[in-house]
Amino acid sequence: MPHYILLSRDNPAQFADISPAEMEALIGKCAAWRQSIEDQGHAISGEKLSGGTGRVLRRGLAATDGPYTEAKEVMGGFFRISAASYDEAAALAASCPHLEFGSIEVREIEPTP
Amino acid sequence: MQLVGELYERQYGRLVAALVRMLGAARLDWAEEFAQEALLRALEVWPFRGVPPNQEAWLITTAKRLAIDRLRREKLPVEPLLLQEKPATDDRLAMIFLCCHASLSEDLQIALTLQAVCGLNARQIARGLMLPEPTVAQRLVRAKRRLREAGARFDEPGQLDSDLAVLYLLFNEGCAVTESASGWFHADLCHEAIYLARLPAQRRPDAQALLALFLLQASRLPARVNEAGEAVPLQEQHRARWDRALLAEGFAHLERSAAGAAVTAYHIEAEIAATHAAAPSFAATDWARIALFYSQLPPSPAVRLNHAIAVGYRDGAAVGLAALNGLDHPGHLLSAARAEFARQLGRIAEARTHYTTALAAARTDA
């Protein structure tokens, strides 16, 4: 089955004043989402990227802040999931609780020949 | 994986307490900052990586790492943080001791306990105590400054009396707020007080009596508000809605609290709550017993008022009204009691006057 990467961008400032109860609810929701992906027979793993912003390196240019800073959205982390097709991966991403806080980019990982 | 909501809500207080143990009471500010930060990291990381099997350990490790980073940056020794952690429950109890330090007035004690032990922010505390937010923020700052100035230490022994008193206040705040609009707050506070009272209750009969009192009172919370969110007086409560599990536990603790030699006010108040709890209906309440218990409590305006009301239900409204005469009680409850007894006697005009006074006073109370 092909694998897809879900790149999550959101605005971390939204979490600055969250109550423990809200936090609990949110983490619970995310845990439930992960579980539902697994229950549907898809592999899922994920990582949080540290720090708010990254840098873009281009030959001949100085390193600049990541491309997302103007939008106040940063790449928070990513998931790797297996799905039968791009559409199925997109459908799975559409139920991701992270969408409440920003956007998710869905990309297929080029299958190993 | 399901997270246990209650557990998570308590993590903040545990983290702060554990960090204060390591960093010292003078760094309560830092402890709060790192606890907050660790919870925030959890919020950022767990959604991607999944929830770790031992959340508490993950949080404490993260908070500790933050603290070590800060100490290194400030060129301070990091050894205290490398020490073995004590069980978190003890830390939380010691944390209440610290928040109830003798250098702090009651107002400051409550605000600080709500923040450092219960994890509420200034806005939530302000909402719960019905105070302006800047007032609460000032109290929190003042409380921490006083602790530093007084050289307060984590784990100072011999403060259990004020410790119990603050739990009592915490619980009362929770109950009082039940009748206001912010219903979300009340049960939290009451259950927080119950949770915290369990710790000293294992060691002291008076704390056990206090726990019994909390449990018996809290059992009525579900019946105290109707579907429309209005307060329901005891007379009209559906007793079937009382929480049977809390009641049973309350009675059990009350029985065990009799082990000590001393009868404290908490014992007597718990007996009063138990008498109400044991009554099959309002009419069948043993008012003689309740009046007797009130007469054994150290007299205060509230105790005198409640005693007079119990006497009124025991001996009739006319006696009750006479007993209320000469009482002085701030707020609306005295007028409300007079109005109720006058109404029972059919003295409608008099009842109306008292109800009007009570209503006016209730508005200023709020």
Image (cartoon, rainbow, N blue to C red):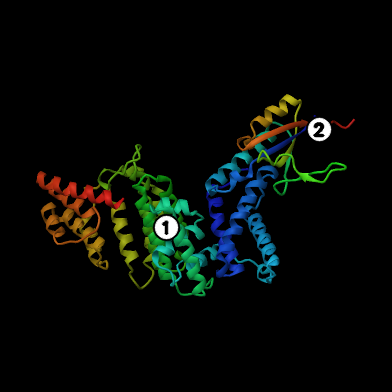
Query: From where the camera sits, is residue B284 visible?
Result: no
Q: Chain of mark 2?
A: A
Query: From where the camera sits, is residue B83 visible?
Result: yes
Pair 1/2: label in front: 1
Measured as percent of width and height from the top left, residue A33 is found at 64, 36
**Image quarter of residue A110:** top right
Q: Chain of mark 1?
A: B
Quadrant, the N terminus of chain B: top right
Q: Is residue B124 left or right of residue B270?
A: right
Looking at this view, name the residue that lies furthest to the front: A61
Q: Is residue A73 left or right of residue A17?
A: right
Callout 2: 10 Å neighbours few (<14), some, many (20+)?
few
Measured as percent of width and height from the top left, residue A66 is found at 75, 42
Q: Residue at x 16, y 52 (%)?
A: B338
Measured as percent of width and height from the top left, residue B106 is found at 39, 65
Residue B135 shows which numbered tag?
Answer: 1
Residue A109 shows which numbered tag?
Answer: 2
**Image quarter of residue B162:** bottom left
Q: Is residue B299 left or right of residue B196?
A: left
Query: Relative to B20, is B239 above or below?
Result: above
Question: Looking at the picture, which amino acid does disc 2 mark?
Answer: Ile
Cα gap from disc 1 to disc 2, whole angstroms? 55 Å
Query: Relative to B292, is A55 above or below?
Result: above
Question: Looking at this view, is B101 or B143 the one in front?
Answer: B143
Measured as percent of width and height from the top left, residue A51 is found at 71, 49
Question: Mark 1 vs mark 2: same chain?
Answer: no
